[in-house]
Amino acid sequence: MLRRWIAAVSEKFGAPSRDFRLVVAAEMGDTAAVRALLAVGANVEATDREGWATLMLAADEGHTETVKALLAAGANVNAADNKGSTALIGAAFGGHKETVKALLAAGANANAARKDGGTALMHAALKGHTGTVQALLAAGANVNAAQNNGNTALMFAVDKNHTETVSALLAAGANANAARNDGATALTVAAGLGHIETVKALLAAGANVNAAQNEGLTALTVAALLGHTQIVRALLAAGANVNAAQNEGVTALMFAVDKNHMKTVSVLLHAGADVNAAAKGGITALMKSAVGGHTERVSALLAAGANVDTRLPDGTTALSLAKKKRHSDVVALLEKAGAKE
């Protein structure tokens, strides 16, 4: 196949150089051609236009025998492109476990990182290649290495819901409470994405259920905002603060009410959520529901003991807000509950 391709190129453009032919052979995994070209003087470190050396090209495609041939000819196992990627990182991203093992056996740096801080372990975790992850860990890969933005291999695996990979990383000592630059932890990420099994695994590994991101969001407030009721239950069972508020004073209950996640609202109220908690400025869940004309939400909050007389600094109440917007059904509910302007 390679010979036919080279013949066709030669007929149109002239004979390609040995180095060019070696680059093509390496990427295609034609080990016999690679050996033949090396034997007649092709440069084992030849690169393509993107700066990828022959070893990187072969490793990226998982051509293990070709990789071994290039290594035997002296290819630099730790050579990197202009972004810092190495043959090991490429092989790990593709989940080519045998290629990864061959590179590691030849002295590949298990902790080499791209310019963005990404390592082979992170790339394998991102794609859920658990066997490759385990091979890298066995070779000394730092399980808690972090990318420039704070992402770790665990966070990458959590983000893609690779539960088996998450378990392997936690078993190897991954820090369940490591945080990204924005303060997000693996638990807040999993809670937001609705990954219940991953949430359970993280909690079992000691993840701080009340850790908050820079904006003050906890796993519970994130799960409530997105209506992940099953996760809300799991977090509450693990000790999540039902009344924790983000930086603007918004609680999990307020988020759930605002997004009309009524099953989540019910769970939070049953767990003791403060139905009268107020965000900055004094607005409550009842006021927000009243101004929006949301009859079902208003009814649920009144049944849970929402105070109809709470006022904003300017004296505004839930009733006055509903009247202003002409939400007659909400007005009737509030007046029946004893609300007065």
Image (spheres, rainbow, N blue to C red):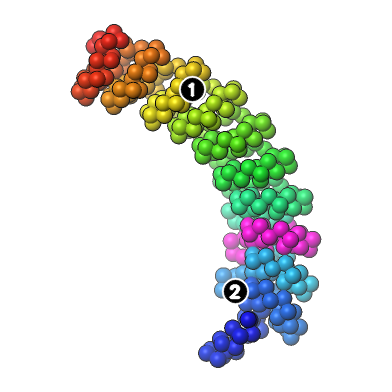
- Please provide percent x and percent y for residue 266: 45, 21
**Which badge, 2 or 1, is on the more N-terminal residue?**
2
Callout 1: SS: helix
For disc 2, the marked residue is 48
Left or right of 37 in this view: 4: left
Note whether 313 is above or below 72 in the view shown. above
Note whether 292 is above or below 67 in the view shown. above
- Residue at image position (55%, 38%) is 195
For disc 1, the marked residue is 267
- Residue at image position (45%, 34%) is 226
Query: In this view of the protein, can residue 32 be seen by the observer?
Result: yes
Labelled disc at residue 157: none
In magenta stretch: residue 94:
yes
Q: Residues within 10 Å of mark 2 (few under 14, many from 20)?
A: some
- Please provide percent x and percent y for residue 171: 73, 40
Query: In this view of the protein, can residue 46 be seen by the observer?
Result: no
Mark-to-mark CA distance, 2 and 1: 58 Å
Q: Please name whichever residue, 261 or 94, is drawn nearer the observer in this view of the structure.
A: 261
Left or right of 261 in this view: 124: right
Q: Which residues are magenta?
A: 81-109
Type of amino acid at the residue the image marks with label 2: Asp
Left or right of 27 in this view: 294: left
- Residue at image position (38%, 19%) is 300
Note whether 61 is above or below 158 in the view shown. below
Type of amino acid at the residue the image marks with label 1: Val
- Residue at image position (72%, 76%) is 31
In magenta stretch: residue 99:
yes
- Please provide percent x and percent y for residue 159: 56, 44
